[in-house]
Amino acid sequence: MIYQGPVKLIKERKNIAILSHVMPDGDNIGSCLALYNALIKLGKNVVIIQDDDVPEIYKFLKSADKVVKPGGDYSIDLVIALDCGDISRLGKSAKYLENKDIINIDHHISNTKFGHHNIIDTNASATAELVYELINKLEIILDKDICECIYTGIVTDTGQFQYSNTTSVTHQIAANLINNGVEPAKVYKALYQNNSISKMKLIGKALSLMEFHYDNKIASIMLSKEDFESLGAKDEDTDGLINYARDIKGVEVALLFKETYERKIKIGFRSKDYIDVSKIAQKYGGGGHIRAAGATVDGELNDIKEKIVEDVINVF
Amino acid sequence: MIYQGPVKLIKERKNIAILSHVMPDGDNIGSCLALYNALIKLGKNVVIIQDDDVPEIYKFLKSADKVVKPGGDYSIDLVIALDCGDISRLGKSAKYLENKDIINIDHHISNTKFGHHNIIDTNASATAELVYELINKLEIILDKDICECIYTGIVTDTGQFQYSNTTSVTHQIAANLINNGVEPAKVYKALYQNNSISKMKLIGKALSLMEFHYDNKIASIMLSKEDFESLGAKDEDTDGLINYARDIKGVEVALLFKETYERKIKIGFRSKDYIDVSKIAQKYGGGGHIRAAGATVDGELNDIKEKIVEDVINVF
């Protein structure tokens, strides 16, 4: 039922824009490109507009080179927003929503239903799952390229089928994608076997410097501006780094302190089972979820680390 | 068809021994425990006999505490060997095969078919897939405990659904396991969020010391006896370490040199796309596969590293 209106609208319209959120991840890119490649097969004129560049690791997906920056004038009679909880997440691309019919497809619980049609399913592991359903309802024949895009969205948003959003439907879809040509080893290689040397050196330094507190229930990693500079590492090289600290036996809270600019400290918080780290992050003007939160504060790296560790100990 | 004989035999017999290979991994333990828990539901007397201890990370699985060492006398009228390519892989437990009816269930291409009944399917991602089929053919109702064991076998043998052995059937089975109660996040937490501090420190040291050769197409990691000792790390803490070196952009060959005993150097070889590392390993009395091989040689750590790196450069 939820797909009926959108399917009718897509069939009627010719010039379609696909939008998604800033700082694109695998589900954003995978969903956009799957839908783009599918709609092209229906003979539509399609444009994908995104504020930020397609990250390098997703460039193996078909039509990754078709993504354009906001600014251009396009004749558009339908906009489809993917994986966006609210309009602000679209950044500058949001202007293409004005006076247009909007289909809003997302799996975030916080979605504000800003579309004229809303396909929101919080049980979906990824927006790519919903795009898969939509493509099937549109009766577009799946090909290997489309399936690789969907598979990428699912793999990245489920952390390789490991997060609690992974359902039996997720696996059934993965099975169908493989039946339609996806080679898991090929996609994983593109996504996870392309690390930079500086990233690996940064992980090495971070793990070597890792400290433990409160009977090893807290693990903390501290990276200074000099650490980044001496290794030629970027902020994005710390993606996933905090998980190394969390995934140690006995560790309940993991903390990552990054001095990205002088006296500007980004703090990452993770917990494993029972500590609500969002409350601590909120105290410092940040926020997030119970098990994953963040904040940015001004100050000296070591001072802030000691203060936060003390705060965390107090909530145990 | 392949299951018909084994199913009949299992239904007829009462006292069943389950065996598997030395140095147990997730598929060994998951398959053995799944079958054990299922056969107990059929009212059988079952014993799992293994040469080595159940690794700590698999102890959350039901009946992990039921595994016994070879040595005892058991009244056995049927033996089921799981995940074993040949009899020698059983270690001392092989003696329980003598004068017994044997069902041999495995997915390794090298399997010697040493059973009276052989369920060998090289398309299965894990022996656990075949145990799942057998349990269904025996019409034993799946429960959450059995499903967690099978899921563990599949997740570990496919590297989280990433290796080329992952098929649509693998995902269909995973879907059914989740429908029968498996919580992916819970299993992943048990398997992958229990690292030791010394392991993390060893990874940190290894990545910090990592060297690059031949225009960064070769990455090498060298760990001395002193490195292990100073960090309190064990040989098993290097599991998966070489993948960090292989998974770097542009790296084709990754090398790991470990001085586990003085002047005894274990070498790990990995390649990404086109170099056959088994040939280099063979030159040093080792062996393995095209993309993953190993050898052990006597000598000084640094000398051996330089020699091997030279050899690898010569095959590019």
Image (cartoon, coloured by chain):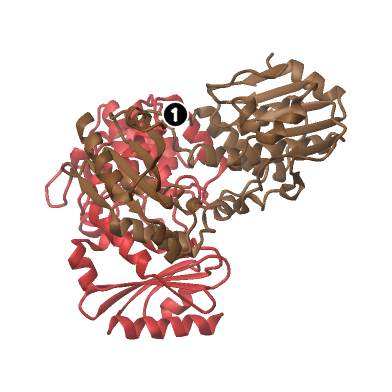
Chain colours: A red, B brown
Q: In the displayed image of the protein, which residue is found farthest to the left?
A: A72
What residue is rendered at 16% in x and 52% in y?
A: A70
Q: Is residue B35 left or right of residue A86?
A: right
Which percent across, then down, holds residue A128?
40, 42
Neighbours of disc 1 within 10 Å: few (<14), some (14-19), many (20+)? many
Measured as percent of width and height from the top left, residue A248 is found at 50, 63
A30 horizontally vs A292: left or right: left
Would you say residue B266 is visible in this rendering?
Answer: yes
Asked whether B70 or B58 is in front, the reply is B70
Residue B115 versus residue B142 in the image, above or below: above
Quick check: A303 above or below B50? Answer: below
Say which quadrant the C terminus of chain B sits in.
top left
> Image point 51% across, 28% down: which residue?
B168
| The N terminus of chain B, quarter of image | top right
What's the chain of the residue with tag 1?
A: A
Query: Quick check: B142 above or below B219?
Result: above
Looking at numbered disc 1 in the image, what kind of residue is underneath it?
Answer: Ile
Image coordinates of residue A16 in percent, x first then y, are: 25, 39
Position of residue A105 measured from the top left corner of the image (x, y, whole percent): 39, 47
Q: Nearer the viewer, residue B299 or B49?
A: B299
Q: Is residue A54 visible?
A: no
Which residue is disc 1 drawn over? A178
A118 sits left or right of B20 in the view: left
